[in-house]
Amino acid sequence: MEEAKRLLAGDLGDICREILRNCCAPFYWQRADADGPRILGSGTITFARTAERSFGITADHVAKQYLEDAAKATTELMIFNASLSGIDLIDRSERLDLAAIDLSDDVMANIGKTIVPMNLGLQSRPMEGRGVMIAGYPRDDLVDEKSRHPNWGLCTILGIARRVTDEQITWVAEPEHASQDSPVPQLPDGYSFGGLSGGPVVGLFETERHLVIHELSGIVSQAHGEFRNIVAKRTEFIRPDGTIREPS
């Protein structure tokens, strides 16, 4: 554990955070008011790739809230700086809280940040007590909300999988796992995770030749800042074409 803390406090931690930064973006919708855009709701979208295609994934409850708000009034859906005419759902599952979204080349080209889709781990199950990386865009870290392109802050967590079931991955903040030497400040008391839903949970795996690889293993479904825990739904239910199979 001490060796892991030392590595993550240095260059390895920077590399892990860069991987997270490049595989997700703010996913939000806004309405024009007299004094500028007003954000109605937000989450995070994760970019995934398979042998067949690339697409976006978010939590189904985020997509559902957008659809409900869009049905009430004209709204503009945004992925970072890219404006979408609507949400092009490939498939969704309320039970698994997963929604796969088709993204056009035009949208991807206008997002305005580096995007490197994450390999979808169809078979890889994170091990309890082993490393996972988590990211998302909390609403409380948003700066200049009235701007046409607001400034979003990225929350990254390099932690340990507390519990892994057939459907879920759970992370809980544990003080003994925190590195005091990290250049990234520790999460303050009362920090809100609202907005992390849809963000990636990336599993770290070691090959027989002792190479460490990373794959998208889950999508954040619940994030509780008060209790400092995150629950993600496993991505093995998402097929290579973006459709979602329901658990038996």
Image (cartoon, rainbow, N blue to C red):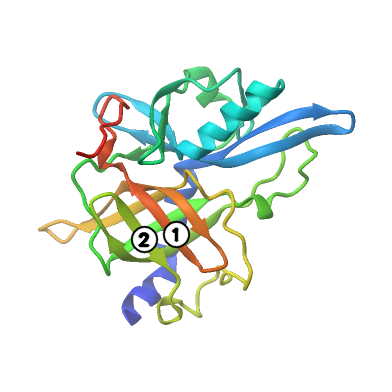
Relative depth, front residue between 199 and 15: 199
Viewer-proximal residue, 11 or 76?
Answer: 76
Mark 1 is on which residue type?
Ile
- Which of 109 and 68 lies nearest the eye of the viewer? 68
Could you tell me which secondary element the residue under label 1 belongs to? strand
Q: Which quarter of the image is occupied by the C terminus?
A: top left
- Residue 93 to residue 76: above or below: below
Indicate left or right for 134 with 34 as reference. Answer: left
Vertical comparison of 7 with 44: above or below: below
For label 2, the SS is strand
The residue depicted at 48 percent of the width and 42 percent of the height is: 24
Task: Give residue 15's quadrant in the image.
Answer: bottom left
Q: Is residue 56 left or right of residue 218?
A: right
| Residue at image point 41% right, 56% down | 231
Q: Quadrant location of residue 140?
A: bottom right
Q: Which x, y percent locates residue 243? A: 30, 26
Residue 132 x %, y %: 35, 60
Label 1–label 2 contact, CB within 8 A? yes
Q: Which residue is mark 2?
A: 170
- The spot of residue 233 in percent (x, y) is 35, 47
User: Would residue 178 be seen by someone viewing this image from the given angle?
Assistant: yes
- Residue visible at 76% across and 32% down? 148
Residue located beneath label 1 in the image: 230
Q: How many marks?
A: 2
Which comes before the other along the chain, label 1 or label 2?
2
- How many neighbours does mark 2 have within 10 angstroms: few (below 14), some (14-19), or many (20 or more)? many
Mark identifier at residue 196: none
**Label 1, residues with CA under 10 Å away: few <14, some 14-19, many ≥20:** many
Quadrant in the picture for residue 204: bottom left
Amino acid at dot 2:
Thr
Q: CA distance from mark 1 to mark 2?
A: 6 Å
